[in-house]
Image (cartoon, rainbow, N blue to C red):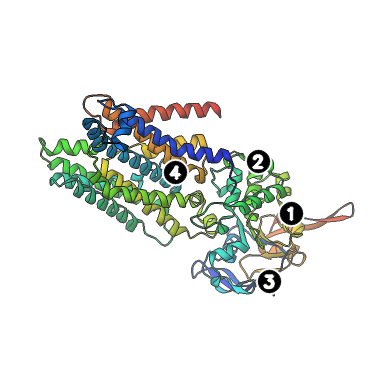
Amino acid sequence: MKINSKKILFNVFLVLIPIIVAIVSLSIGRMMISFDEIYKSIFNFKNADKTFRLIIINYRLPRIILAILCGMGLSVAGLSFQALFSNPLATPDTIGVASGASFGAVVAILFSANNIVVQILSVLMGLIAVSLTWVNAKSKNLNLSYLVLSGIMVGSVFNALVSLVKFVADPDSKLPTITYWLMGGLGNSGYKSLIIGAPIIIISIVITYLLRWRLNLLSLSEDELVSQGVNVKSLRIIVIILSTVMTASVISMCGQVGWVGLIVPHLCKMKFGNNHVTLVPIVISVGAVFMLIVDTIARSITATEIPISILTALIGAPFFIYLLRIMRKKN
Amino acid sequence: MSLLEIKNLNFSYNEQRQIINDLSFNLDSGDVLAILGPNGSGKTTLLKLIMGMLQYRGEILLDGQDIKKISARDFWKKVSFVPQQRNVVNSLNVYDSIMIGRSCYIGAFSIPRDEDFFACDRVIDELGIKRLKNRYCDTLSGGELQLVLIARALVSNPKILILDEPESGLDFRNQLLILNVIEDLKQKKITSIFNTHYPKHALQKANKTIMLGDKNPIYGNTLDVITEKNIENIFGIKALINEIRVGNEIIKNVVPLYVV
């Protein structure tokens, strides 16, 4: 491989940036905490202030880990789906993952289940939704157009079921919880809730990272793909499974966080081109940073926390349009 | 032993109409085979059959081995495919696109290595497309894209190159450019198989030709296959084959006269 110092430096930069942003984010909040205190709380806790240590270790740190995981997971899943369908507008909900996962979660909330059950049911329903999409679209050669059509249908059925749950939910207690949950947020984070989701997301991201060269091939037509000696069907199935479990795990932990899977990959493509070998690590890094920034704003800008999908859209969409305009001018 | 042996090949999409009827032929290294025939006569189908993409009756042997028994990876190291450029959608830049042709050498969990970069640089040099290296494929003209697609196919060092209508949709100059590239492959002992709508391209560049029509396919040396009589039988037109002397070279040409 062509290795030069510029490339190495860039990769180090990709790893360092999320870490730096995470440290800054640890200090920001309704209570500002100095870097010195952060250091003491994590590495030298005998001398640390108890309140600061409590805030950092029990509240901010798990939340920041969750933000990093969500950002990476949603961005990588978005990138994979866009490659898979050769469509820049493809998102995890194209084949019904998000709708299914949401349905699982709201049902669990309706029956007052605890967080772990919400997560498990959510991941499970996300997978069931995709399996249904798959079964409906099943043909000898796995036609992607059928898959999308079937995904839209399955997605709308699950969206209707979510509405049904909201309709029957107690408007005083359950309905607000469900509505807030659907708007997304990282407020429920804790080390316990990370146990199920984190390993799934990390493993899926690692495998996608290793497969990054293969993602380039997905944009080829069927005959071209076959003529590269690639097993088309298994490659597509692997990418679908990885992206599905990533998305479902994220949704199970922090609700429907829209836009990230669309904005982050496109931001990176505008700047760095479409070669997934370089794109995947960049998207992982930028996804983490994007979510960290948005979540830090969500929890610190006002006294009550702002649901995160509102912010991802409010910050992400205008920024995206701004970038589109710059790119158009350049061309 | 021939490089490619086709024995009693039969294929039909449905029972009513047989597309390929009992076709047999052999190709050696450096042969150029043209496939001619009216629209819908099965030119692209024949290419797909040779590449093992469709179920067939009969035998196709590559280096003496039945292609059904060769692993996909090993098969595509020996055979490369250049699709019709109008069907190609590609958002990568030229260099990365050409690198895709190395896929059968790159493991599923791997990325291009030194030898892959060398192969890419070599093909880019050979085809003289260095100036296109950093352009995006969706900004290329038809002729440029066709060259890139050929480069992508050649980067895996194939023994056989299969091209689906390589010169269709191109202007005069680019047609000649692409045909010359195919001709140059002879010297490198690469066998090429291409289908075309132009009998004169087959006459000028191919040493062997297959004509597909309603009846049994006609196969043989190009000069024996592309005759005024065969053109009338297969295409239903009266055509004139003439010779033009340019310097010491005699160039054959086919002039269509009228529909029979």
Q: Within 10 Å of the Cα at label 2, are there few (<14), some (14-19), or many (20+) other Cα atoms? A: some
What amino acid is at disc 2?
Leu
Work out whether mark 1 precedes mark 3 in sequence or the reverse, and give the earlier one: 3
Residue A140: image quadrant is: bottom left
Q: Which quadrant holds the C terminus of chain A?
A: top right
What amino acid is at disc 3?
Asn
Mark 3 to mark 4: distance in Å?
Answer: 42 Å
| Residue position marked by numbered label 1 in the rendering | B257
Are the residues at dot 3 and dot 2 in contact (C-beta closer than 8 Å)?
no
| Residue position marked by numbered label 4 in the rendering | A87
Query: Element type at marker 3?
Result: strand
Residue A133 horizontal/vertical position (percent): 32, 53
Q: Name the side, left or right, on which B2 lies relative to A331.
A: right
Same chain check for tags 2 and 1: yes
Residue B245 horizontal/vertical position (percent): 87, 53
Task: Please state which of the two labelled residues, at mark 3 or mark 4, is closer to the viewer.
Answer: 4
Are the residues at dot 1 and dot 3 in contact (C-beta closer than 8 Å)?
no
Residue B132: which disc?
2
Are the residues at dot 3 and dot 4 in contact (C-beta closer than 8 Å)?
no
At 71% from the left edge and 57% from the top edge, which residue is drawn?
B199
